[in-house]
Image (cartoon, rainbow, N blue to C red):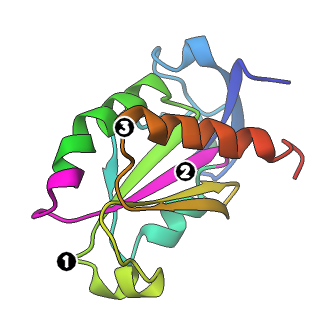
Amino acid sequence: MLNNTVIVRCKACRTLNRLPLDKLSSHPVCGQCSAALEVPREPINVTAASYDQQVRDWPEVVLAEFWAKWCGYCRAIEPFVNVLAMKRAGRLKIIRVDVDAERVLAGRFTIKATPTFILYRNGKQLARFDGAPAQHSELEHWIDRTLQQQSPAG
Ligand SMILES: [Zn+2]
């Protein structure tokens, strides 16, 4: 297991770079072209135009959150999701979709409840969680459980 390293794709030359987790905060650069490697530490707002690329371009785990401005559950869980993005920077990338602004995208995933969470690894959908978890920590447990059930090779 290589739990102490992450793989980050360079946006400039698309090379995959393996980085030690403790190097993430020291402005890592691409080994191939020396461009700065971006390691998101907060949720990224995505649109229909960027969704697939955001999912594909991150070789580790991606959590997509479909949310709405008027959704109280979404507002309630937002600080927890933000902390998760920071705590798991380099391993977990969180992307957010505003279902009112992105109706086509919400339709594509048949979003019936907000929030809805979809978990990906290597661009492949692993699981989804429809609706708000009763406890915020349940979301994190669901992520860990899902990843444990998937063999790292699969
Ligand atoms: Zn590069």
Instruction: Choose between 69 and 9: the one closer to the eye.
Output: 69
Q: Nearer the viewer, residue 109 or 32?
A: 109
Mark 1 lies on a secondary structure that is loop
The crowding category of the residue bearing disc 2, from other C-alpha atoms within 10 Å (few below 14, some 14 to 19, many at least 20), is many
The 10 Å Cα crowd at callout 1, few under 14, some 14 to 19, many 20 or more, is: some
In the rendered view, tell whether residue 108 sits above or below residue 49.
Answer: below
**Residue at position x 24%, y 34% in the image:** 79
Q: Residues within 10 Å of mark 3 (few under 14, many from 20)?
A: few
**Residue 81 % position (x, y):** 34, 39
Residue stretch rendered in magenta on the structure:
59-73
Say which of marks 3 and 1 sits in front.
Answer: 3
Depth order, front residue of 13/126: 126
Amino acid type assigned to the residue bearing label 3 in the image: Gln
Counting residues from the start of the chain, the first of labels 3 and 2 encountered is 2
- Residue 62: mark in rendering: 2
Q: Nearer the viewer, residue 143 or 108?
A: 143
Whether residues under marks 2 and 1 lie with C-beta atoms below 8 angstroms apart, the answer is no
Pointer 1 residue:
100
**Kind of residue at disc 2:** Val
Q: How far is mark 2 from mark 1, CA to CA?
A: 22 Å
Please name the residue that numbered disc 3 is placed on.
135
Q: Secondary structure at mark 3?
A: loop
Q: Amino acid at mark 1?
A: Asp
